[in-house]
Image (tube, rainbow, N blue to C red):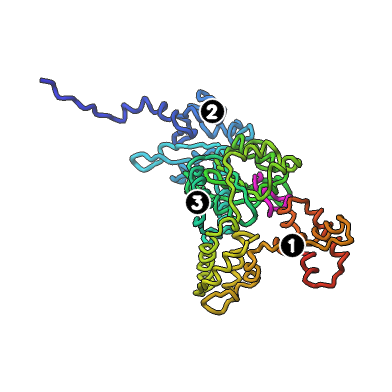
Amino acid sequence: MLAPQMHMVYTPDMLAEYVEKLCDTFRDAICVTDRKGYCVLVNKRHAELTGIPRSKILGTRVQDMVKNGLFDVVLNSRVVEMGESVSEVQRLSDGRSLVLEGHPVFSNDGEVAYVVTILRDVTALTALRNEIAVQKELLETFQNMSMRDKTTTKYPLVMQSRAMQRLNGEAMAIAETDATVLLLGETGVGKDVIARHIHRDSRRANAPFIKVDCGSIPENLIETELFGYVPGSFSGASRNGKAGLVEAASTGTLFLDEIGELPMLMQSRLLRVLQDFEVMRVGATTPRRVDVRVIAATNKDLEREVDRGKFRSDLYYRLKVAVLRVPPLRDRKADIQPLAKSFLTYYSGKYGKDQKFSEEALEALSRYSWPGNVRELENLVQGIVATCQHSIVDVADIKGIALSAKGDGHEKFAIPALEGRSLKSIMKELEQAVLVKGLEQYGSISELARHMQMDRSTIFRKVRAMKAAKGAGHSRKKTLLTAD
């Protein structure tokens, strides 16, 4: 029969021989002095932090160390006198600063028997404070973006058309990966809706979704907006620095809308993010790691931009991983009525109204070509809700659309008279008709230039010449020719 196992009884004396080794495991420096100031114990970290060997400190009065210039502050006398903890900053002979915390250890009769002083390197505390500041910057950046971007609820993902159902299937397959996505499509087709949809169905759904409109940020600010800056980088900069939008999107999704508008220098910096997943703040000397998925969108032909030298080929091929083309609204007519109803519900709730479309109004909306795509439809519905005084929205309330819808928005140009005219004059007349029609449809020279795939300056020159030739007799055309 086995004898019962005896349990060892531990006493403080058994631990005493290990006290010094136990103290050596602490990350903070420790110095223990008696009530007279004689040092009785220091740990390994103390010698590393102060640069003074343990053998030189043990048995020495800390007050004498001040006299000899090793330290400029001791807490022993104050802790013994006050009987409570004391904090102070210690400056070493090499110029470094330490934070000291002195704590009393009382004897059985209530007197201070020992003083335990803990030393911490201010450099380490500064690094921790900087890390906290970075986290605060990221939080503030993300909160500002969240306050700025409140449009998600009014953009439903409507998939009645086969084109959108097919696109949705492709998007869902891509969402399960971390692949970079390039969304192509005309202005206003809802590329941001697809981007958010991909984010919501990805493993990053609970992380930030940061949208950056590359075309709306001034060129002199886009670098600091995207990549942030360190303190003192330039005049007027925050003394704490600022996190950029790329950092704010870390662990989540960065949506770069209208990436074709990104300046060449910023394209180079973005390439580093995609290649190395690193961000270099303005004024910094070391990069920061980021874990971010990039979704980019553009209405430009990037291959053509590469050929023209306006977009980096290496960045284009980095973006061209998973490419999705969002069809224009005219190619998915089955989505027009559901979208219109969704926008009407949204804006009716926003403006405190209760409105419905008549069947005739819905039919008129379906017949229209929607050159401005979903954005044009949304703006129209918002205007209807704001101005319509009755609950049923009829054809008469759809100003500017009902008349065009009769011809499905594809009216043909009449061939100019040919008799006695040169081909050059005939083509010039056709060109002017196209310009007038284009300005009516797209609303500005910039948008017309994009859709025509021409330089804005070329179209502007042609429009100016046409205006000069025709004069200012027709007020409506005058307005159109100066629109931009």
> Which residue of the protein is positioned furthest toward the left in this rendering?
1
Q: Helix, strand, or loop for circle 2?
A: helix
Residue at image x 51%, y 66%?
A: 341
Quadrant of the rendering where the N terminus is positioned: top left
Residue 97 placement (x, y as % from top left): 59, 38
Residue 44 placement (x, y as % from top left): 48, 27
Say which mark, if any, is on residue 165: 3
The nearer-to-camera label among 2 and 3 is 3
Q: Nearer the viewer, residue 278 or 436?
A: 436
Q: Mark 2: give few (<14), some (14-19) or many (20+) Cα within 10 Å.
A: few
Q: Which amino acid, mark 1?
A: Phe
What is the span of residues highlighted in magenta in the rendered image?
214-229
Quadrant of the rendering where the C terminus is positioned: bottom right
Q: Are marks 2 and 1 in contact (CB under 8 Å)?
A: no
Q: Mark 3: give few (<14), some (14-19) or many (20+) Cα within 10 Å.
A: few
> Is residue 12 visible in the rendered structure shown here?
yes
Badge 1 is on which residue?
A: 413
Badge 2 is on which residue?
A: 48
Residue at image x 88%, y 64%?
A: 469
> Which residue of the protein is positioned furthest toward the bottom in this rendering?
389
Q: Mark 1: give few (<14), some (14-19) or many (20+) Cα within 10 Å.
A: few
Residue 413 placement (x, y as % from top left): 74, 62
Residues under labels 2 and 1: Cα distance? 87 Å
